[in-house]
């Protein structure tokens, strides 16, 4: 069994805070501070540019990719880390379209994260070959898969409600219709059991600053199934995706396998923090994480519905049908969340009316859940959210 008392001790948590927002930004791993300081002083400071070789900076994207791969059911050598999630979405979608050239429809749903849809819109517009982005309700995705679709591009866990798509079922349906799949694991990696190899997914992407706790702006990752890795043509053919970057050829030649999905120079300082964060996953079973997160979320739902009747559950009630987050709806959701944050209960708000909470067993337990519900009950039943300062919209919600 996973020792959650041990993992809890690995994270810094400010006093007086119930942190239910690890689905947006994971907390600071205590070891990350020292790891980054060591990288900056002993490596960058003393080695200077020699650090690329002496400290293996250039290989960090592959090494971290393999560490993340263990959490998402990806074989060694199929995941690489770098750049941003939006860039990785662009790469994956462009590569999938290139592998299915006779079709012109990209299918997604309106529970997908907007940035993914923006990247698709931009890519399809620039290709200017009559492509269509078809966006349906999450419940309609399976029925919309047909032989007109080139690529199914889906976020596995709906960022607003936590609704969970069945990756294996939808991928099988897609493949039967000759459709390739791109899965966004932003709210999956480190939160639920993912088996990319078992599901036969074609491409997957994700970020590392949520459940993986890599820090603000931590780099993204991309997975390419082994059967595609040797033939995909990355639309963003960057220097470090070249077969031999330091040959300085003027013409691009793809690197071998997953290396061709590298684009820019590795963010070495950020990767040092992510490497420290990945240490927390040693000895952790994703099955245990999943079981505990469902239990914590179920407890939260029961208590909130019993004590805060004004709030309406927006997430699936069945834990097997949602990720590790729960949302409730209320017309004054933004003000409610600001009042919660002012009292040390940190979640977030998603327009138009959802207050959202994440459940991450690596560092929270029943005590935090019950403490957060107690504060929420007081705020709701005494209308403490109904103050001008809580209605003033901040840049980040």
Image (tube, rainbow, N blue to C red):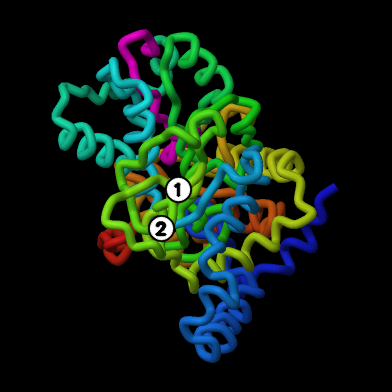
Identify the element where label 1 is drawn.
loop
Q: How many neighbours does mark 1 have within 10 angstroms: few (below 14), some (14-19), or many (20 or more)?
A: some
Let me know if residue 101 is in the magenta part.
Answer: no
Give the residues in magenta: 144-162
Q: Is residue 16 visible?
A: no
Of residues 88 and 263, the one drawn nearer to the viewer in this rendering:
263
Q: Which mark is residue 240?
A: 2
Q: How many neighbours does mark 2 have within 10 angstroms: few (below 14), some (14-19), or many (20 or more)?
A: many
Residue 234 in picture, x, y percent from top left? 36, 41
Which numbered disc flags the more N-terminal residue, 2 or 1? Answer: 2
Of residues 170 and 233, the one drawn nearer to the viewer in this rendering:
233
Q: Quadrant of the C terminus?
A: bottom left
Residue furthest right in the image: 1
| Residue at the image position 62 percent from the left and 64 percent from the top | 277
Residue 113 in picture, x, y percent from top left? 36, 40
| Residue at the image position 36 percent from the left and 12 percent from the top | 144
Let me know if residue 151 is in the magenta part.
Answer: yes
Residues under numbered marks 2 and 1 in contact, where contact means CB atoms less than 8 Å apart: yes
Image quadrant where residue 129 sits: top left
**Vertical side of 46 occupied by 254: above or below:** above
Tell whether 71 sits left or right of 285: left
Residue 172 in picture, x, y percent from top left? 54, 15
**Vertical side of 278 occupied by 10: above or below:** below
According to the picture, the residue beneath numbered tag 1 turns out to be: 255
Q: Is residue 190 visible?
A: yes
Mark 2 vs mark 1: give the one in front. 1
Tell whether 99 sits left or right of 277: left
Residue 293 in picture, x, y percent from top left? 67, 43
Q: Separation of disc 2 and disc 1 at Cα?
A: 8 Å
**Vertical side of 308 occupied by 62: above or below:** below
Q: Which mark is residue 150?
A: none
Tell whether 157 sits left or right of 91: right
């Amino acid at each position: 069994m996973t020792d959650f008392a041990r993992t809890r001790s690995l994270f810094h948590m400010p006093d007086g805070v119930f942190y239910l927002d690890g689905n947006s930004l994971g907390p600071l791993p205590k070891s990350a501070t020292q790891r980054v300081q060591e990288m900056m002083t002993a490596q960058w400071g003393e080695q200077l540019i020699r650090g690329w070789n002496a400290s293996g900076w250039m290989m960090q994207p592959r090494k971290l990719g393999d560490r993340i791969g263990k959490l998402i059911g990806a074989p060694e050598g199929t995941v690489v880390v770098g750049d941003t999630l939006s860039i990785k979405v662009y790469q994956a979608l462009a590569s999938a379209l290139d592998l299915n050239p006779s079709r012109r429809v990209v299918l997604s749903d309106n529970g997908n994260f907007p940035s993914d849809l923006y990247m698709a819109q931009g890519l399809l517009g620039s290709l200017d070959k009559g492509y269509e982005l078809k966006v349906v309700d999450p419940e309609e995705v399976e029925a919309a898969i047909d032989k007109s679709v080139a690529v199914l591009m889906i976020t596995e866990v709906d960022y607003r409600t936590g609704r969970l798509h069945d990756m294996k079922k939808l991928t099988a349906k897609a493949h039967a219709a000759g459709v390739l799949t791109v899965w966004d694991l932003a709210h999956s990696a480190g939160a639920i059991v993912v088996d990319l190899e078992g599901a036969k997914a074609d491409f997957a992407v994700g970020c590392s600053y949520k459940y993986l706790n890599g820090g603000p702006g931590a780099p993204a990752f991309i997975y390419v199934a082994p059967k595609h890795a040797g033939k995909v043509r990355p639309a963003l053919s960057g220097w470090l995706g070249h077969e031999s970057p330091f040959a300085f050829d003027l013409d691009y030649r793809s690197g071998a396998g997953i290396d061709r999905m590298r684009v820019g120079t590795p963010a070495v300082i950020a990767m040092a923090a992510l490497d420290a964060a990945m240490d927390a996953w040693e000895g952790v079973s994703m099955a245990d994480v999943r079981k505990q997160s469902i239990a914590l979320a179920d407890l939260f739902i029961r208590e909130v519905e019993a004590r805060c009747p004004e709030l309406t559950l927006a997430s699936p009630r069945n834990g097997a049908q949602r990720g590790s987050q729960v949302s409730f709806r209320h017309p004054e959701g933004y003000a409610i969340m600001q009042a919660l944050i002012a009292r040390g209960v940190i979640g977030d708000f998603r327009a138009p009316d959802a207050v959202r909470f994440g459940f991450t067993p690596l560092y929270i337990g029943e005590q935090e859940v019950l403490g957060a519900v107690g504060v929420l009950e007081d705020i709701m039943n005494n209308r403490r959210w109904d103050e001008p300062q809580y209605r003033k919209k901040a840049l980040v919600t």
